[in-house]
């Protein structure tokens, strides 16, 4: 894909001051997500539904010293509505996970300190891998086997991305329509670096098209780059979310939505938006400085509630 200049992009981006008819005539690959978009994506629950209707998620996470990443991602997955969650973790995290998240089932790895094996069970509706897994060679082998054998939709984050950066073959093996969620540093390691944020954005768009997966480039106005060459900018979130574990929470949210059979695009758009909205609720009630990742999880319910309220208001109008 041929990169386009900053000037071209600014010419393509429609201004909110333009007449609506003019906006429709402007062709662009760049879009801004609005609350009405997300309100239309979040599904209402059937009053007669049971946990089996909302999917079974598999989370592969954690290593010695990084069990907290698994905890955060697991809690966020359940808070985003997944019916069931199994967390595959190294043995050192068993007591921690069992006591902090009684709602989650756990699958214990044979190794004590990091991930070395994984069963490929068709009962799972979606897979998330990466938070806190480290970059051990045996964990990289798990990634190879997972990418080769898994048929479920997948979200890949953190150390799984770092392992991909170390091995180009992994980049080629990642199943199509998977969701990659790097921050700027992780994406630079993966793509070879960029001189500035705009160049990084263009690379992310190119990567999404070339590899046929979704790239969620995290940061201010997180960009969701798609295989069909579109880019959606997220309006929610604040600087207080630049804190340890925030990305693990996002991975859990997207995993929970994938498990509920949201499409990869809708899971990415909805997950990023609600993640930022929950962070905004915290920042308003407390402060950006005091915000920690656990606060985002605890306010996911309010984010869903606020979104549902807007959705109901829209239907009434």
Image (cartoon, helix red, strand yellow):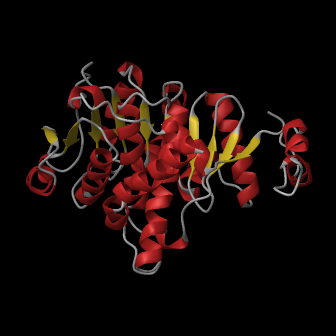
State whether residue 245 is above or below residue 97.
below
State whether residue 68 is above or below residue 261.
below
| Residue under the image location 30 percent in, 49 percent down | 79
Quadrant in which the C terminus is drawn: top right
Q: Position of residue 54 (x, y in %)?
A: 30, 31
| Residue under the image location 77 percent in, 39 percent down | 29
| Residue under the image location 42 percent in, 77 percent down | 285
92 or 279: nearer the eye?
Answer: 279
Q: Is residue 55 visible from the viewing direction of this image?
A: no
State whether residue 171 is above or below residue 10.
above
In this figure, what is the number of numbered marks?
0
Using residue 186 as the reference point, say whether residue 99 is left or right of it: left
State whether residue 301 is above or below residue 286.
above
Answer with the quarter of the image where residue 4 lies.
Answer: top right
Q: Is residue 65 visible from the viewing direction of this image?
A: yes
Q: Position of residue 46 (x, y in %)?
A: 31, 30
278 or 35: nearer the eye?
Answer: 35
Using residue 209 as the reference point, say whether residue 253 is left or right of it: left
Using residue 224 as the reference point, say whether residue 196 is left or right of it: right
189 or 280: nearer the eye?
Answer: 280
């Amino acid at each position: 894909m041929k990169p386009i200049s900053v000037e071209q992009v600014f010419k393509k981006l429609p201004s909110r001051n333009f007449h609506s008819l003019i906006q429709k005539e402007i062709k662009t690959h760049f879009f801004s997500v609005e609350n009405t978009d997300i309100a239309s994506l979040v599904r209402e629950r059937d009053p007669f539904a049971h946990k089996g209707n909302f999917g079974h998620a598999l989370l592969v996470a954690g290593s010695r010293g990084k069990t907290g990443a698994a905890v955060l991602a697991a809690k966020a997955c359940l808070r985003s509505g997944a019916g069931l969650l199994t967390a595959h973790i190294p043995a050192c995290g068993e007591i921690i996970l069992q006591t902090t998240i009684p709602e989650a089932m756990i699958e214990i790895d044979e190794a004590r300190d990091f991930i070395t094996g994984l069963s490929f069970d068709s009962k799972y509706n979606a897979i998330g891998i990466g938070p806190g897994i480290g970059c051990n060679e045996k964990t990289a082998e798990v990634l190879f086997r997972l990418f080769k054998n898994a048929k479920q939709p997948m979200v890949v984050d953190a150390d799984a991305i770092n392992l991909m950066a170390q091995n180009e073959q992994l980049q080629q093996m990642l199943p199509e329509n998977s969701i990659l969620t790097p921050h700027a540093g992780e994406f630079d390691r993966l793509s070879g670096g960029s001189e500035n944020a705009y160049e990084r954005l263009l690379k992310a768009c190119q990567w999404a098209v070339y590899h046929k997966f979704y790239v969620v480039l995290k940061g201010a106005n997180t960009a969701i780059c798609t295989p069909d060459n579109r880019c959606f900018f997220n309006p929610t979130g604040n600087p207080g979310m630049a804190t340890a574990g925030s990305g693990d929470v996002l991975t859990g949210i997207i995993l929970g939505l994938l498990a509920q059979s949201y499409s990869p695009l809708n899971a990415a758009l909805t997950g990023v938006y609600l993640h930022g909205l929950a962070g905004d609720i915290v920042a308003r009630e407390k402060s950006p400085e005091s915000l920690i990742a656990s606060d985002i999880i605890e306010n996911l319910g309010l984010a869903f509630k606020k979104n549902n309220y807007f959705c109901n208001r829209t239907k009434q109008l």
